């Protein structure tokens, strides 16, 4: 009965739109899809395919008097970005970032927020249409939640899509320390062709000086820890799909300053949703990089028809580095042996320049990094070192999976991997190396 009210409402809007003058077309794409007082709480699997939030828990809920009841606890959290690198941040319920909140359009949600921080906080429900007094802007729409206090937010979800939550009190500090989370609202009725795999990734950035563990909220430009769901590669869990699955990846960005062009290898995806607004299929276009601006969510979709281990990463090259030393001199191509010897004799006995042959060797150097820091570059792959860290993860697509655990590295069909050219290859194709080789 209640469900058909929603479906009827959507149909009525759609048919009315047909007769609307062009200048009123905005009404046809209104994000409001439910206007009542709340429906029976939507149930996972029965009503929606639960989202997958790698490296990040979900916020538990229970039903009381027809409402979904959640409890967020803002508190200090000792967080691991990847083995070897920890941060003393602030998060929710023991997690950085906060747990994924998952609900269904038409749900009435009641969210308690307890403040265990040393200063006040609030929670803003970013992108969600709700009564003004539930918007969570400290001072403007509510009193700040003082340390030790618990506030109650309650509203009905009138839209579906990808939303976020974060403090709106001392935002610069609290968000720089990790306080943010994703809020996924599923449609009340599972759409035809809904994805089998629905991933959610929050993008963020941090400044953690090597040897320290407290993120620096004052940093404006030189972020050195770039994260997906609070993790850097090689600490990022892969996204696993079965060949033939339809896949959605939701991205949110609540970093302080940087927009992230996220690039997927091996596929062309379609931009399916911006800020929780579904884009009609006929208006979606194909792309392989999606720019996710600060304060925005973007969701992309594609059919996983190509098995393999496909890189998924920010395409800003400095965002796929861990704790890059941006003050280093550019020494590529410089013969530093003479400099090293000179400096060792006169100034610093252990001195050694780095970077004269590029930076790729640095993760193998094992030179000893300061306490609580990790090498600039990622980790060991199946063939060699993967020279990316930071905002990098892997989409693993495999035939015939029966469960979505990490399937390990891709086993390539024979003859489909780039390898060193043989003498015979070179001779057959007339590639003469003696001509091109420089002294
Ligand atoms: Cu980036």
Image (cartoon, rainbow, N blue to C red):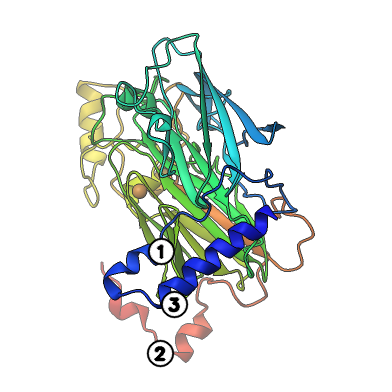
- In this rendering, is residue 203 above or below 349? below
Give the numbered dot on residue 430: 2
> Of the residues under marks 2 and 1, which one precedes in the sequence?
1
Label 2 and label 1: CA atoms lie apart by 60 Å
Q: Nearer the viewer, residue 349 or 224?
A: 224
- The residue that disc 3 covers is 282
Q: Position of residue 147 (x, y in %)?
A: 45, 9
* Mark 1: few/some/many CA within 10 Å (<14, 14-19, 20+): some
In the rendered image, which quarter is residue 408 located in?
bottom right
Give the numbered dot on residue 29: 1
Quarter of the N terminus within the rendering: bottom right
The reply to whether discs 2 and 3 touch (Cβ–Cβ < 8 Å) is: no
Q: Position of residue 181 (x, y in %)?
A: 49, 36
Give the numbered dot on residue 246: none
The reply to whether discs 2 and 1 touch (Cβ–Cβ < 8 Å) is: no
Horizontal placement of 288 versus 245: left or right? left
Q: Residue at x 70, y 31 (%)?
A: 65
Q: Nearer the viewer, residue 320 or 291?
A: 291
* Mark 2 residue element: loop
Q: Position of residue 426 (x, y in %)?
A: 46, 83
* Mark 2: few/some/many CA within 10 Å (<14, 14-19, 20+): few
* Mark 1 residue element: loop
Label 2 and label 3: CA atoms lie apart by 48 Å
Q: Residue at x 20, y 22 (%)?
A: 346
Quarter of the C terminus within the rendering: bottom left
> Of the residues under marks 1 and 3, which one precedes in the sequence?
1
Q: Residue at x 67, y 71 (%)?
A: 244
Label 1 and label 3: CA atoms lie apart by 14 Å
Label 3 CB less than 8 angstroms from ligand 1 = no
Q: Mark 2 against mark 3, which lies toward the viewer?
A: 3
């Amino acid at each position: 009965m209640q469900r058909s009210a929603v479906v009827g409402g959507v149909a009525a809007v759609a048919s009315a739109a047909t007769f609307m003058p062009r200048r009123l077309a905005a009404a046809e794409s209104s994000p409001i899809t439910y206007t009542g007082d709340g429906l029976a709480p939507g149930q996972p699997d029965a009503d929606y395919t639960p989202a997958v939030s790698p490296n990040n828990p979900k916020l538990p809920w229970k039903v009381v008097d027809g409402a979904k009841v959640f409890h967020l606890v803002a508190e200090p959290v000792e967080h691991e970005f990847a083995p070897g690198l920890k941060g003393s941040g602030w998060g929710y319920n023991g997690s950085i970032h906060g747990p994924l909140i998952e609900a269904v359009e038409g749900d009435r949600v009641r969210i308690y927020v307890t403040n265990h921080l040393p200063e006040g906080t609030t929670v803003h429900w970013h992108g969600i249409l709700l009564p003004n007094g539930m918007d969570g802007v400290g001072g403007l729409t509510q009193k700040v939640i003082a340390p030790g206090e618990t506030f109650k937010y309650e509203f009905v979800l009138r839209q579906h899509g990808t939303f976020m939550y974060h403090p709106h009190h001392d935002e610069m500090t609290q968000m720089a320390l990790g306080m943010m989370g994703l809020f996924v609202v599923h449609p009340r009725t599972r759409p035809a062709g809904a994805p089998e795999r629905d991933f959610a990734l929050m993008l963020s950035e941090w400044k953690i000086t090597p040897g320290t563990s407290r993120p620096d909220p004052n940093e404006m430009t030189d972020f050195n820890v770039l994260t997906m769901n609070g993790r850097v590669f090689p600490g990022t869990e892969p996204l696993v799909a079965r060949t033939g699955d339809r896949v959605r990846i939701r991205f949110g960005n609540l970093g302080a300053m940087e927009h992230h062009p996220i690039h997927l290898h091996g596929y062309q995806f379609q931009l399916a949703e911006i800020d929780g607004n579904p884009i009609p299929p006929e208006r979606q276009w194909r792309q392989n990089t999606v720019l996710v601006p600060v304060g925005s969510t973007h969701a992309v979709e594609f059919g996983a028809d190509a098995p393999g281990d496909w890189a998924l990463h920010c395409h800003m090259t400095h965002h796929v580095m861990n704790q890059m030393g941006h003050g280093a001199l550019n020494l590529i191509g410089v013969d530093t042996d003479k400099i090293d010897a000179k400096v060792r004799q006169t100034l610093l006995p252990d001195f050694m320049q780095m970077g004269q042959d590029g930076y790729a060797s640095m993760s193998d150097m094992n030179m000893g990094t300061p306490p609580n820091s990790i090498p600039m570059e990622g980790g060991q792959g199946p063939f060699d070192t993967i020279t990316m860290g930071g905002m990098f993860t892997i989409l693993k697509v495999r035939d015939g999976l029966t469960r979505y655990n990490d399937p390990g590295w891709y086993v390539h069909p024979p003859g489909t991997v780039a390898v060193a050219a043989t003498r015979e290859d070179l001779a057959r194709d007339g590639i003469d190396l003696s001509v091109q080789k420089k002294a």
